[in-house]
């Protein structure tokens, strides 16, 4: 339907502020539902409010059906005002995950959450020059209260109190705010978010605190080479009128010191900025919830109708124009042109933070945001970044110059803006490749010339294949979480993108039209005259080389092309002012430029060239059928539903709750699990076609002897549900009663061991939940020699590196088809994961697994396996050494690594591994690699759209590959087992203080670890309860109120079956000693708060945690990971979340308090380890954060850390916890 023909729709339930009824006319936009993916059960509606705000409403139908059956109460924001009056205004912002190895603890509620996201069409490109970072600063300050909700951080408090989460971020041309929250609190959250845009307080009292938060965020990102490159682009761009040239992050200098020097009040600027840009027609909103579209529309109207239609300074200028679906936005930077002028043929030589060699060529193109139908940049990126035979990467790898490459226009606002698009080709070079950068660029332009030589006759099958791959990925994508859904959708909805309203769901995902002429027109711009060259290389030096050494020479403005680059010849580098990046600018030899230009002209490559168009992809899936389940255990409308049964008990009949857990179609019988865990088969009196999977449906069983009615229906992706169909269900939702525990799954719906021998154990589970043509195969290869020494461990990692290297072309082709594979080494062997469309999954696995097995049974004389050239050994070794060099560069990574090494004595450090392979020769490596695989055994799990026959086929394949490659089998009793050190209890913690590795980072990290003991389900849930109770007040006090740093958190730890709990603070403003003491003080204060906690408040938290435990998996990958962890660790608790919920059910506050006193109370002896990774003085100046740093030469940091770890092991007297699982 054309949007211009849509009639005005009047809503009748919205109220004005005085509470009087008021109809608010809205326009309904184009229908999105025809463009949604086939498996998407949600319903969509677009509306346009009279003030110009556009919104997409998403009705989560599956969740709505369940909620309606349970009578969830929707809370009006005014309904809980009294409840909120008692809040003390503490900021209770949900902490973000801060460590790469943190386990995913969930966080969604028992029912799928509601969520909303709002984006404003203004970002850092609109910062005023005298207050750089103002858009980002405003994003922070809006959280500090509004006229309607004046208590500071009321929004965050509301979210945290009700189990929600929220965040925001500032991009170049838009700023986005989003949240997720349990369904019944959606209205209150929407209203609080709306007040950001109606009447925020923007108080001066919050300025200094939020400035510190922005400074901390800046410090955390300061050492990112990617961020540094983007800022260098801005500092060296040729268009000073373009905001691309400005510093966009913001820090204390740009938002406080410079404005004060210029007599500018940042708060005045901020309010002016808000008044100018924060108005309804410059906003887009997306809301998803378990409500009807009409209900969602009423909520949005009620909350957002009072957002000003025009910039506030124009409100008195007359009537605003009537909003229309035909209107489009016009970015203020559209007419500014790109940030770069025609190339001056210069190269920027940049000193990186990490050890790396990256060569980037960037072409400036016209803005591509309007080319959503054809996506020509995606097509070109597909060809330039291809990794199969004939590709640029394949050719350059064979010369040992390049190891990886990436091509494309980035998605962030710096690279893909209303004024320009920056398309970048980045090569990761070997040391040898550093000196061959001119030839690498020549090869790139040779490939471009080849693409141009086809004109408009590029084979259409390339586009057809791309089109199919995009369509498959969209059609069978996993159901996103509500938060991811609204965030992704509102990003595509951003005003400056002007994506047609009817294409919001699929416009950014699919290819709609092939235009070869458009591709060729763009390729003309891929020439040296339109390019910028940026060259990161550690061979140019490290930033620390220039910090303390004062040179007499002034930096050259531009180095002449004739100057051979070396540090002595070129003198001091320039320094970018905001991030401190050191760089030189050098002219490129005109002869090189001429050569590149000639090569980029349309022409076929030379006859001896290895370049060609990519081959057709053998991994494109063609079979998307869902495998049928066995007839005696198959799907049924009542399966997993909660029912009530009218059953004769003596002379009376009683209604008893039960859940259908299995269906036998051969007998037309259902298996029912009753509340007391008793199970019984019942024969249905009708066929499945006559039943309705809806609440309230009634029927009979066992020749009409038993009546039943459906009480609750599981939503998509959820397993069996148990409800009682009375007021107890509502009490659960209100947090006053513990939730009903779903029945245990029948054995056939859990992993089954289908192959069991000393050589191979393979578990299988057919997916009955997500119903997509995808599968996951996990494989663990056990070896007892991998961790024999740091040399053996490094050789195992080198084997993996060589496998990746030789499999690049194969793995890349599969990855294009959403068929992914990974190989890794660990202390006890090797691990594989192959996941994606199941059609060609085993074919890919066979190629990958055979490659690892090819190292088996070889001698030094045999050399490397067939297909791996000797030259690749040195390249792989270089990549491995670079990985070791770049490890633990961040202070938090250093602290985490030291903690793990302390408590896991068998863990080798990167420095130890690096030292052992420094002189490793190829023959020695071959012998060690072969020995690692001499005696092995395998455990595996095959899960997804695969039946028992498919699982047996996988088992046969694995056994065949094991047998054909060797005969040695490793008995389970000889598996390597990592023993965990037992920390001696004491009143004071063991403190391991180490210097951070990156001298340029001003961040200090503290990890305070408490060791609890062997895994036990009762202690495990107590730890989870303590974390649940502590994480919010810890974040609120240390992060928000006291501004210790941007990262503050607490979390549970599970290390080879040993439980623990850790606290983390990363700070640039406090010393490690202060942070350690502050954690101890928090524990003292928390103990008092826990003791005073009311039973009602405790129960609400207990129910919230139980709901988290009972939350469904969001994807097949999540479910696979949970089951695989049980197999890998040897615990085999398939229903661990359900069992933990059972353990929580009887957990009393007194038990939690006793556990706190035993494990955490500062007044008792505890098993503690504190790791402090302390930063170096910045710019030669000591700071609080650098106080206490050990005086160690940078070259000796690794040895110093090794000594501290050894000291800890001696303190533990080599005592360990022993084996936890058999």
Image (cartoon, grey):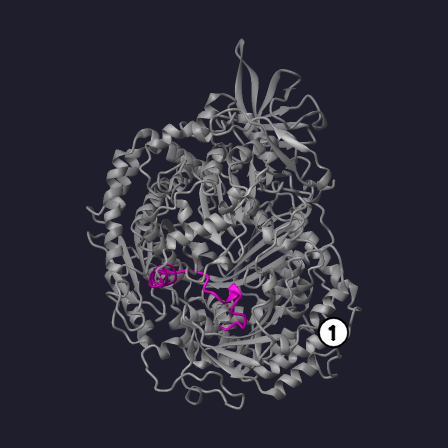
Q: Position of residue 132 (x, y in %)?
A: 43, 61
Image: magenta residue range: 236-262
Q: Relative to 255, is 860 above or below?
A: below
Give the residue number, with chain letter if any, for mark 1. 452
Residue displayed at 45% across by 39% down:
195
1200 or 545, which lies in front? 545
Residue displayed at 63% across by 62% down:
367
Q: Position of residue 262 (x, y in %)?
A: 36, 63
Q: Is residue 241 a member of the stretch shown in magenta?
A: yes
Q: Position of residue 554 (x, y in %)?
A: 39, 84
In this rendering, the count of numbered labels is: 1
81 or 1143, which lies in front? 81
Q: Relative to 734, is 1108 above or below?
A: below
Is residue 927 visible in the rendered image? The answer is no
Q: Answer with left or right where residue 1117 lies relative to residue 1010.
A: right
Furthest residue toward front:
317
Q: Position of residue 225 (x, y in %)?
A: 46, 69
Callout 1 crowding tier (Cα within 10 Å): few <14, some 14–19, many ≥20: many
Q: Answer with left or right where residue 78 lies relative to residue 938.
A: left
Residue displayed at 35% across by 85% down:
551
Task: Kindly indicate the quadrant of the structure image that contains residue 975.
Answer: bottom left
Q: Relative to 521, is 66 above or below?
A: above
119 or 656, which lies in front? 119
Q: Answer with left or right where residue 864 lies relative to residue 692.
A: left
- Label 1's element? helix
Q: Is residue 294 a member of the stretch shown in magenta?
A: no
Furthest residue toward right:
457
Q: Relative to 129, is 1128 above or below?
A: above
State the quadrant of the N terminus. Answer: top right
């Amino acid at each position: 339907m054309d949007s211009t023909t849509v009639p005005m729709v009047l809503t009748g339930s919205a109220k004005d502020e005085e509470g009087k009824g008021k109809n608010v006319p809205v326009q309904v936009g184009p229908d999105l539902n025809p463009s949604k993916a086939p498996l998407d059960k949600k319903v969509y509606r677009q509306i346009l409010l009279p003030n110009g705000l556009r919104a997409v409403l998403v009705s989560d139908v599956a969740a709505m059906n369940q909620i309606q059956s349970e009578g969830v109460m929707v809370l009006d924001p005014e309904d809980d005002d009294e409840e909120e009056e008692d809040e003390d205004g503490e900021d209770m912002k949900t902490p973000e995950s801060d460590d790469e190895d943190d386990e995913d603890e969930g966080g969604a509620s028992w029912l799928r959450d509601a969520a909303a996201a709002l984006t404003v069409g203004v970002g850092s490109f609109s910062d005023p020059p005298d207050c750089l970072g103002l858009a980002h600063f405003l994003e922070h300050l809006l959280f500090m209260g509004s006229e309607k909700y004046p208590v500071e951080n009321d929004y965050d408090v509301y979210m945290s109190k009700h189990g929600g989460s929220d965040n925001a971020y500032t991009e170049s041309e838009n700023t986005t705010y989003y949240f997720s929250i349990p369904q019944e609190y959606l209205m209150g959250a929407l209203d609080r978010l709306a007040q950001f845009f109606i009447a925020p307080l923007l108080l001066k009292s919050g300025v200094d605190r939020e400035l510190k938060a922005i400074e901390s965020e800046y410090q955390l990102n300061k050492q990112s080479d990617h961020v540094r490159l983007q800022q260098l682009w801005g500092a060296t761009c040729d268009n000073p009128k373009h905001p691309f040239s400005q510093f966009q992050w913001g820090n204390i200098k740009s938002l406080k010191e410079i404005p004060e020097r210029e007599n500018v009040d940042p708060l005045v600027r901020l309010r002016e900025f808000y008044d100018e840009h924060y108005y309804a027609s410059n906003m887009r909103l997306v809301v998803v919830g378990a409500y009807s579209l009409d209900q969602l529309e009423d909520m949005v109207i009620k909350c957002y109708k009072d957002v000003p239609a025009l910039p506030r300074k124009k409100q008195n200028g007359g009537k605003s124009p009537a909003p229309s679906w035909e209107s489009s936005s016009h970015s203020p930077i559209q007419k500014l042109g790109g940030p770069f002028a025609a190339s001056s043929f210069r190269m920027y030589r940049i000193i990186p933070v990490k050890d790396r060699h990256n060569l980037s060529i960037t072409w400036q193109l016209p803005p591509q945001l309007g080319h959503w139908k054809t996506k020509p940049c995606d097509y070109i990126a597909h060809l330039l970044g291809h990794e199969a035979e004939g590709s640029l990467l394949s050719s350059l790898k064979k010369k040992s110059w390049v190891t990886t490459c990436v091509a494309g226009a980035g998605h962030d606002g710096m690279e893909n803006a209303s004024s320009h698009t920056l398309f970048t080709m980045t090569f990761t070079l070997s040391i040898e490749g550093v000196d061959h950068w001119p030839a690498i660029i020549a090869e790139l332009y040779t490939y471009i010339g080849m693409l141009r030589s086809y004109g408009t006759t590029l084979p259409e099958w390339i586009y057809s294949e791309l089109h199919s791959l995009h369509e498959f990925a969209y059609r069978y994508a996993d159901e996103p979480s509500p938060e991811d859904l609204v965030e992704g959708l509102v990003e595509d909805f951003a005003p400056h993108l002007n994506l047609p309203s009817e294409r919001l769901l699929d416009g950014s995902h699919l290819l709609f039209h092939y235009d070869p002429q458009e591709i060729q027109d763009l390729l003309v711009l891929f020439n040296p005259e339109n390019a910028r060259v940026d060259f990161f290389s550690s061979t140019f030096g490290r930033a620390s080389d220039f910090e303390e050494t004062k040179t007499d020479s002034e930096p050259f403005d531009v180095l002449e092309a004739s100057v051979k680059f070396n540090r002595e010849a070129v003198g001091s580098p320039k320094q970018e002012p905001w991030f401190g990046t050191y760089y030189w600018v050098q002219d490129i030899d005109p002869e090189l430029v001429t050569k590149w230009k000639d090569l980029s002209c349309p022409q076929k490559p030379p006859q001896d060239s290895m370049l060609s168009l990519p081959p057709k992809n053998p991994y494109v899936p063609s079979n998307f059928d869902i495998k049928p389940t066995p007839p005696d255990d198959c799907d049924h409308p009542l399966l997993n539903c909660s029912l009530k049964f009218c059953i004769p008990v003596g002379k009376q009949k009683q209604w008893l709750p039960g859940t259908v857990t299995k269906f036998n179609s051969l007998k037309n019988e259902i298996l029912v699990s009753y509340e007391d865990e008793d199970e019984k088969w019942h024969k249905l009196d009708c066929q499945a076609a006559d039943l309705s999977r809806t609440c309230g449906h009634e029927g009979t069983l066992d020749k009409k002897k038993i009546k039943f009615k459906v009480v609750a229906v599981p939503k998509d992706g959820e397993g069996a549900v148990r409800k009682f169909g009375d007021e107890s269900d509502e009490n659960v939702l209100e947090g006053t009663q513990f939730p009903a525990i779903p029945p245990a799954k029948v054995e056939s719906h859990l992993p089954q061991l289908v192959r069991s021998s000393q050589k191979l154990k393979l578990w299988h589970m057919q997916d009955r939940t997500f119903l997509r043509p995808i599968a996951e195969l996990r494989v663990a290869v056990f070896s007892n020699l991998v961790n024999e020494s740091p040399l053996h461990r490094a050789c195992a990692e080198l084997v993996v590196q060589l496998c990746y290297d030789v499999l690049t072309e194969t793995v890349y082709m599969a990855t294009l088809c959403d068929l992914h594979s990974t190989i890794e080494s660990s202390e006890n062997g090797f691990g594989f994961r192959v996941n994606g469309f199941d059609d060609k999954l085993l074919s890919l696995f066979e190629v990958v697994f055979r490659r690892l097995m090819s190292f088996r049974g070889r001698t030094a004389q045999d050399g490397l396996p067939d297909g791996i050239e000797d030259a690749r050994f040195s390249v792989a070794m270089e990549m491995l050494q670079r990985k070791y060099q770049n490890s633990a560069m961040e202070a938090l990574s250093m602290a985490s690594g030291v903690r793990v090494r302390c408590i896991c004595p068998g863990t080798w450090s990167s420095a130890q591994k690096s030292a052992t392979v420094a002189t490793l020769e190829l023959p020695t490596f071959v012998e060690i690699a072969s020995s690692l695989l001499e005696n092995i055994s395998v455990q595996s799990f095959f899960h997804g759209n695969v039946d028992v026959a498919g699982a047996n086929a996988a088992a046969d394949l694995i056994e065949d590959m094991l047998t054909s490659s060797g005969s040695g089998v490793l008995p389970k009793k000889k598996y390597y087992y990592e023993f965990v050190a037992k920390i001696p209890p004491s009143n004071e913690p063991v403190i391991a203080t180490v210097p951070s590795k990156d001298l340029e980072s001003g961040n200090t990290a503290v990890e305070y670890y408490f060791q609890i003991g062997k895994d036990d389900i009762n202690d495990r849930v107590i730890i989870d309860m303590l974390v649940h109770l502590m994480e919010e007040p810890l974040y609120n006090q240390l992060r928000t109120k006291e501004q210790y740093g941007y990262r503050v958190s607490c979390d549970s730890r599970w290390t080879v079956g040993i439980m623990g709990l850790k606290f983390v603070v990363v700070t640039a403003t406090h010393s490690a000693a202060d942070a350690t003491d502050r954690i101890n003080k928090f524990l003292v204060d928390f103990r008092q708060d826990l003791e005073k906690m009311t039973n009602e408040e405790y129960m609400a938290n207990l129910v919230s945690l139980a709901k988290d435990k009972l939350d469904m998996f969001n994807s097949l990958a999540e479910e696979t990971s949970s089951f695989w962890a049980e197999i890998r660790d040897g615990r085999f608790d398939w229903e661990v979340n359900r069992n933990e919920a059972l353990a929580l059910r009887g957990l009393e506050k007194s038990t939690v308090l006793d556990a706190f006193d035993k494990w955490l109370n500062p007044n008792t002896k505890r098993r503690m380890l504190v790791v402090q990774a302390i930063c170096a003085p910045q710019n030669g100046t000591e700071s609080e954060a650098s106080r206490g740093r050990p005086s160690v030469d940078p070259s000796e940091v690794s040895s110093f850390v090794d000594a501290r770890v050894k000291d800890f092991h001696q303190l533990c007297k080599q005592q360990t916890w022993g084996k936890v699982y058999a």
